[in-house]
Image (cartoon, rainbow, N blue to C red):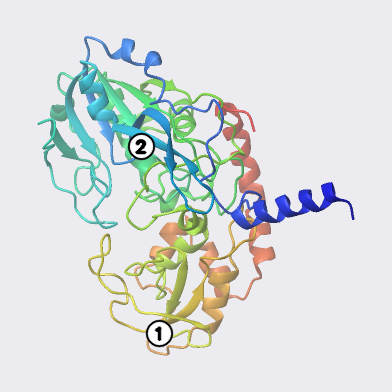
């Protein structure tokens, strides 16, 4: 074995150890030349000049002001370099550039992204800028005409995760609908989708439309939030078939099958790339008697319940940031720890859901919640019935094929970026 081969082998092993070749991770290292919509102010500041602007954003709406190398001294190596990023919220950036921001609309989890899932977010005032904050979660999911009075343009800048039941696409839909009805322009500053480049999951049936699924699309639909908005507008999915004046500020050098760094966690219980990758597969548990780890330091990376004792991993949910009263609070749960799961997750994995159902042993309670929230998440009652009847993952996924192919034809009309 020659020296060059040994060196190449060692480098390969190191790269694998670091996760470079592991498609599991959604947060990759910096991609040369890539820029989000927000990071190209030359494309939108001029369009906003002399306009009255509202902004829909949260803690993920960030503009990169500078990247610089941070040199840290290391006794053994003499120095190691790392990239530091200086960011500013899109609201602060617009104000700094003399854009007339009249109001901020906050989605689920709030403007600062610290509210529990489903928690009512209150209106208020941003302490830093003094700009009024209007909640778009709770009873006021769609902006009222008086909340849009005098507004010329609504800027939308939120990091999405590309999954149907993640509610930011629903917020965008209601926003576009209100904008169309009140003659207000919508401008979307596009961001990466960590589940881009593939389609998977059951397609929602119209009967099961809700805020966690407003359109007949699969669980994973393979579009950025900017492309998704184009689809909603183009297919006339807004109420009464209205269409918004829609401006997309696209990303630069973005590829749908590559993975890009996310600067801040999209919500309290998706704290990292691992939880984001597992989210499409594990969120179905939210409609069952099984916890997905809310109230632990591994949300959406573990699952379990007091009634699945044949599974090896143990954890006890307790109140914490982002989960003030977690499901199964204080109860010892048995399940699996998937935080080191290293297989390709560019697909939905039903293995864990089926395994938990088969291991569930509580004669007092059905595996599925009585409110059938599981059906709402799945988009119909078919998946629940398939699991109960003992269908295999292969059989279940085969039943999705025709609907996915039909959606794929719609999706293809709105793709902006190359694979």
312 over 257 or under it: above or below: below
Residue, disc 1: 306
56 over 298 or under it: above or below: above
Residue 324 falls in image quadrant: bottom left
In percent of width and height, residue 211 lies at 34, 48
- The 10 Å Cα crowd at callout 1, few under 14, some 14 to 19, many 20 or more, is many
At horizontal 66% and vertical 51% (from top left) the residue drawn is 15
- Image mark for residue 327: none
342 over 364 or under it: above or below: above
Q: Quadrant of the C terminus?
A: top right
At horizontal 24% and vertical 69% (from top left) the residue drawn is 325
301 over 76 or under it: above or below: below
Numbered label tally: 2
Residue, disc 2: 158
Q: Quadrant of the N terminus?
A: bottom right
In percent of width and height, residue 154 lies at 27, 24
At horizontal 36% and vertical 47% (from top left) the residue drawn is 167
- Say which of 42 and 13 sits in front: 13
Looking at the image, residue 372 sits to the left or right of residue 400; the answer is left
* Secondary structure at numbered mark 2: loop
* Secondary structure at numbered mark 1: loop
In percent of width and height, residue 224 lies at 49, 35
Q: Please tell me which of labels 2 and 1 falls first in the chain.
A: 2
- Say which of 262 and 162 sits in front: 262
Looking at the image, residue 198 sits to the left or right of residue 379; the answer is right
- Say which of 357 and 366 sits in front: 357
Residue 78 seen: yes
């Amino acid at each position: 074995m020659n020296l060059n081969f040994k060196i190449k082998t060692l480098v390969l092993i190191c790269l694998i150890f670091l996760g470079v070749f592991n498609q599991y991770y959604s947060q990759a290292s910096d991609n040369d030349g890539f820029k989000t919509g927000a990071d190209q102010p030359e494309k939108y500041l001029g369009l906003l000049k002399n306009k009255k602007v509202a902004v829909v954003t949260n803690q993920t709406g960030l503009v990169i002001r500078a990247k610089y190398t941070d040199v840290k001294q290391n006794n053994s190596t003499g120095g190691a370099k790392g990239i530091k990023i200086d960011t500013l919220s899109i609201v602060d950036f617009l104000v700094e550039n003399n854009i007339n921001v009249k109001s901020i609309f906050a989605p689920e989890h709030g403007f600062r992204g610290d509210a529990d899932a489903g928690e009512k977010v209150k209106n208020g005032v941003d302490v830093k800028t003094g700009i009024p904050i209007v909640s778009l979660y709770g009873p006021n999911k769609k902006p009222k005409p008086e909340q849009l009075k005098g507004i010329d343009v609504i800027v939308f800048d939120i990091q999405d995760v590309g999954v149907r039941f993640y509610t930011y696409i629903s917020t965008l839909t209601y926003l576009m609908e209100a904008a169309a009805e009140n003659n207000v322009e919508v401008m979307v500053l596009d961001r990466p989708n960590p589940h881009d480049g593939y389609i998977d999951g059951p397609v929602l049936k119209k009967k099961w439309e809700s805020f966690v699924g407003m359109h007949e699309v699969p669980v994973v639909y393979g579009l950025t939030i900017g492309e998704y908005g184009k689809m909603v507008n183009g297919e006339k999915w807004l109420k009464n078939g209205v269409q918004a004046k829609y401006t997309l500020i696209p990303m630069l050098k973005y590829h749908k099958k590559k993975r890009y760094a996310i600067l801040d966690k999209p919500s309290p219980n998706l704290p990292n790339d691992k939880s984001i990758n597992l989210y499409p597969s594990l969120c179905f548990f939210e409609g069952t008697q099984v916890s997905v780890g809310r109230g632990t330091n591994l949300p959406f990376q573990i699952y379990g319940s007091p009634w699945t004792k044949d599974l090896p991993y143990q954890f006890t949910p307790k109140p914490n940031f982002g989960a003030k009263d977690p499901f199964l609070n204080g109860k010892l749960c048995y399940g699996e720890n998937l935080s080191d799961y290293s297989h390709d997750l560019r697909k939905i994995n039903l293995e864990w859901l089926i395994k938990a159902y088969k291991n569930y042993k509580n004669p007092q309670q059905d595996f599925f919640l009585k409110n059938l929230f599981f059906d709402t998440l799945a988009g119909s009652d078919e998946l629940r019935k398939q699991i109960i009847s003992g269908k295999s993952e292969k059989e279940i996924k085969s039943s999705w094929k025709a609907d996915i192919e039909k959606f794929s034809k719609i999706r293809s009309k709105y793709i902006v970026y190359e694979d």
